Amino acid sequence: MFKRSNILILLITLASLAAMAQVRHVTTVNPMSPNRAPYDAIEVYEFDYVDVQPQFPGGEHGLINFINKTREYPYHAYKNRIQGRVLCSFIVGADGKVSNIRIIRGTQDESLNREALRVISEMPRWKAGKVDGQAVAVRCVLPIAFRL
């Protein structure tokens, strides 16, 4: 006869095995998003669950250089010595175009949040992510740091 603790351990084990068995995490972008036409939903893969991850032109080094060249410290934040990190998400489409830019966690200073959105919106096309050799839309998360 199983004790309660053994049943609990069994349930936790089964739940973790089921979670590990998931091969792909796919979500659907909100069709009512301001960046999409009505009823124009797309499937989006999560960054860690694609065969080939999307890549910025020039790789990670190129991405860092792009952010450092494009980012402009907002005057008000600079003058008041406000620092922070804005965590953003965006989708790299099957064509490599960046869209659906969102702030996941921003700073209390809105000018830093707006600047992070501006930097990401000016990104060139990425090399698209792939699943089974086919280009797919992939959600990426990127922090934009503002330090003095």
Image: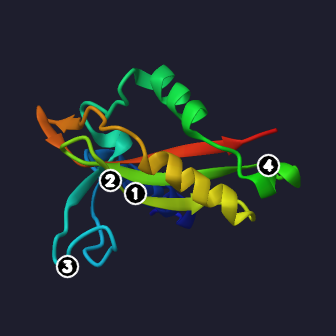
What amino acid type is highlighted by mark number 4?
Gln
Secondary structure beneath label 1: helix
Label 2 belongs to which residue?
A: 18
As drawn, the label of residue 15 is: 1
Secondary structure beneath label 3: loop
Task: Locate residue 145: give its quadrant.
Answer: top right
Q: From the viewer's side, name the closer residue of 114 and 9.
A: 114
Residue 104 pos. (x, y %): 55, 60
Between the C-alphas of marks 3 and 2, the distance is 35 Å
What amino acid type is highlighted by mark number 3?
Pro
Between the C-alphas of marks 1 and 2, the distance is 5 Å
As drawn, the label of residue 83 is: 4
Residue at x-position 35% and y-position 38%: 124
Between the C-alphas of marks 4 and 3, the distance is 38 Å
What amino acid type is highlighted by mark number 1?
Ala
Task: Nearest to the eye among marks 2 and 4: give it.
Answer: 4
Residue 87 pos. (x, y %): 58, 52
As drawn, the label of residue 38 is: 3
Task: Nearest to the eye among marks 1 and 4: give it.
Answer: 4
Q: Residues within 10 Å of mark 2 (few under 14, many from 20)?
A: few
- Could you tell which of marks 4 and 3 lies nearer the N-terminus? 3
Badges 3 and 2: C-beta atoms under 8 Å apart?
Answer: no
- Could you tell which of marks 2 and 4 lies nearer the N-terminus? 2
Between the C-alphas of marks 3 and 1, the distance is 37 Å
Residue 42 pos. (x, y %): 19, 62
Horizontally, residue 2 falls left or right of residue 137, namely right
Badges 4 and 3: C-beta atoms under 8 Å apart?
Answer: no
Residue 75 pos. (x, y %): 76, 52
Q: From the viewer's side, name the closer residue of 63 and 80.
A: 80
